Amino acid sequence: MTRRNSSLILRLAAGLMIFLGLAAATVRAGEPSSQNPVDSLYLKGQLLVASPEIQDPRFMESVIYMVNHDQSGAFGLIINKSYGSGPLKEFLKGFDVDVSGVEGTINLYFGGPVMPGAGFVLHTADYEGPGTNAVNKDFAVTTEKIIMQAIAEGRGPRNSLFAYGYSGWGPGQLENEIRRGDWLSAPADMDLVFDTDQKTKWKRASGKARLKL
């Protein structure tokens, strides 16, 4: 790992400590208040895949895991654009947890252009703690830093992805973009979501994609 990446890991860890509470409010704000008869149009728990038509550099060839999508809008995390990687131990040090015995590396992802300082942990649903919002039986998002302690102690989720910022749309906005052909949808599977091979993730997701609306 380069000195630049090491410094980035520490700076982002500090930022995540500050903004996790703000991220929690963002996730809760996107939760649907009731079931809607047109829920079949929505992509919660699925992948949103950029079509070749999108040339916006923020979203070009993006694969987005959709945390929420209903009549009030949409909220997702880009899962194939990384800021960089480094030792997991160095990242966890920023959370004042005991990192003795901690090994491995971590990738820090660009979740989207909205609230770029807010941190989100997308993970498998085998972990549940304060600030955890279940998406479905397979995936959840946690926005409280106590998950860092659980990870350091080996009690964390089997798989996790750390993202800064999110991708968001207002009511009806994403549906219109899909109708226009900007986005495709695809089923979300753990192998693709948590795979660190970012260079091929968009191509693989595109192969699974289908028009939703």
Image (cartoon, rainbow, N blue to C red):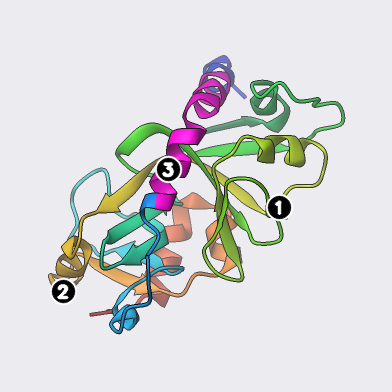
As helix, strand or loop, the secondary structure at mark 3 comes to helix
Vertical placement of 132 versus 18: above or below?
Answer: below
- Closer to us: mark 3 or mark 2? 3
Vertical placement of 142 versus 49: above or below?
Answer: above
Tell me which label, 3 or 2, sits earlier in the chain. 3
Viewport quadrant of the C terminus: bottom left
Q: Which residue is farthest front? A: 33
- Tell me residue 165's x, y (percent): 39, 39
Contact (CB < 8 A) between labels 3 and 2? no
Residue 73 in which image quadrant:
bottom left
Look at the image and give the residue range highlighted in magenta.
Answer: 8-28
What residue does disc 2 label?
A: 179
Q: Residues within 10 Å of mark 2 (few under 14, many from 20)?
A: few
Please say whether residue 17 is visible from this viewpoint: yes
What residue does disc 1 label?
A: 157
Residue shown at the point (82%, 44%) measured from the top left: 154
Residue shown at the point (43%, 69%) measured from the top left: 46
For marks 1 and 2, give the CA distance.
Answer: 36 Å
Q: Decide if residue 167 is on the left or right side of residue 133.
A: left
As helix, strand or loop, the secondary structure at mark 2 comes to helix
As helix, strand or loop, the secondary structure at mark 1 comes to loop
What residue does disc 3 label?
A: 25
Residue 1 in the magenta stretch? The answer is no
- Closer to us: mark 3 or mark 1? 3
Residue shown at the point (30%, 39%) measured from the top left: 113
Q: Mark 2: which amino acid?
A: Arg
Front-most of residues 35 and 152: 35
For marks 3 and 2, give the CA distance.
Answer: 30 Å
Residue 9 in the magenta stretch? The answer is yes
Residue shown at the point (19%, 47%) measured from the top left: 56
